[in-house]
Image: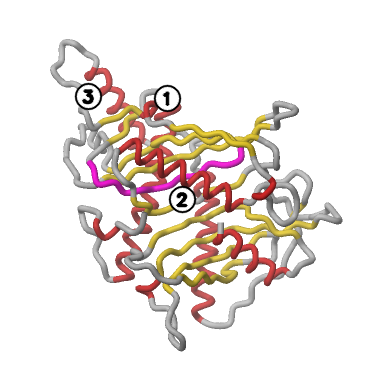
Amino acid sequence: MDLDALSGVIAYKHTGESVTTVTAAVDRITINHPLEEICDLELSGQVTFATGRSSMEISLQVAKAPAKGQSVTKEDVLLTCAFTMVSLDPSTKKSAIPVKIPSHTLTPVAISPLHVDTSEERHLFDLGEKNYTAKKAMAKRALLKQTPNDEESDLIHAMWLKQLAYHDPNQEIRKPHNIIYMDNTKLHSSQIMQPQYRNRHNFMIFGGFLLKQTFELAFCCAASFSHTRPTFLALDPSTFENPVPVGSVLYLTATVAFTDPAPVSASDEPNEATSATTRVQVRIDSKVRNIEHGETKPTGQFNYTFLVEKDIKVMPRTYSEFMIWVDARRRAERVSSTLQGMASENGVLPQGDGKSERITE
């Protein structure tokens, strides 16, 4: 909640108070270094990408508060994250810029582009532009628009064959105890939205509160799945689709969508290798229901990655679950490349047991 609030403050510093700014998406939250002591934390951030349209990228970091007169070192940075904020004009309701925003009553308005002076600012701006381009490319490759590729189709077929073998009385092979079917991993929650969690502009629920609720359910889902205490690694890009009004009912569904290592390998053979740790990706699907009219709308999808100290795998059974698994696998590959890139920058090689990735609870 504090990160979302800070991103709003930074956005208003760039746009001024004449516009209304809302959180459109959480692009990523990544743990960099473990927090090994109780200490004061410093939250800081800046606008790192804005081209003059209605949206801007806010990059934030949380670090151990440095001593007076000293600056934050790379080893002191606990986590980094990025938010996409959209500026809206609540008065004119007119704009020449078509942008999908989580509101039906406000329209986007152009803001000032970001001017960069130093090489460091240029580097941050280029990273923001790279993230913007990557999000567009991911949208084009979405499973709602394209079928799974050849490798993904082979994996789906291999898992289907394994399930047939598990139930064939003429074969000795049976489902291992550490493989859990996806439909058995689900957790649900529902709650009425109270006014103390509304944002500053209207009677819509603050986005940071929604992130808090989804994270807690994801943590509980990973814990009930593995029967261990999960360690948070990353939040994948997540978009707020529709606003959540005060007085409505919020429904959350958590599902273990993917585990790494997977139950089968790319060679269509079962992945029988054991591992001391497993990366668990939990998908949260959220929807809001208007009590008076019974109308239900999706409010967003959130994907959290955890590390658990156990060899455990999830396996889908239906076609819908296979599509969830494929989508999560793609996200897991991006998270893995991000973590390896961070390890290379910090001069730390990722260990096979995942110890270098254990961050904070």
Disc 3 crowd, CA 10 A, few/some/many (<14, 14-19, 20+): few
Query: Residue 64 is drawn in which quadrant?
Result: bottom left
Kindly check if marks 1 and 2 are in contact, taking CB atoms under 8 A apart as contact: no
- Which label sits on residue 81? none
Type of amino acid under label 1? Tyr
First reached walking from the N terminus: tag 2 or tag 3: 3
Query: What's the magenta bit mostly, secondary-structure-wise?
Result: strand
Q: Residue furthest bottom?
A: 69
Front position in the image: 57 or 11: 11
Q: Residue furthest right?
A: 92
Q: Which residue is mark 2?
A: 236
- Which label sits on residue 175? 3
- Residue 161 x %, y %: 27, 22
Can residue 100 be seen from the camera position used here? no
Front position in the image: 62 or 316: 62
Q: Residue at x 34, y 53 (%)?
A: 336
Q: Secondary structure at mark 2?
A: loop
Q: CA distance from mark 1 to mark 3?
A: 19 Å
Magenta stretch in the rendered image = 298-310
Q: Which residue is mark 1?
A: 319
Can residue 357 be seen from the camera position used here? yes
- Residue 8 x %, y %: 64, 63
Query: Is the N terminus in the top left, top right, bottom left or bottom right quadrant?
Result: bottom right
- Residue 21 x %, y %: 70, 59
Residue 131 in the magenta stretch? The answer is no
* 61 relative to 25, above or below: below
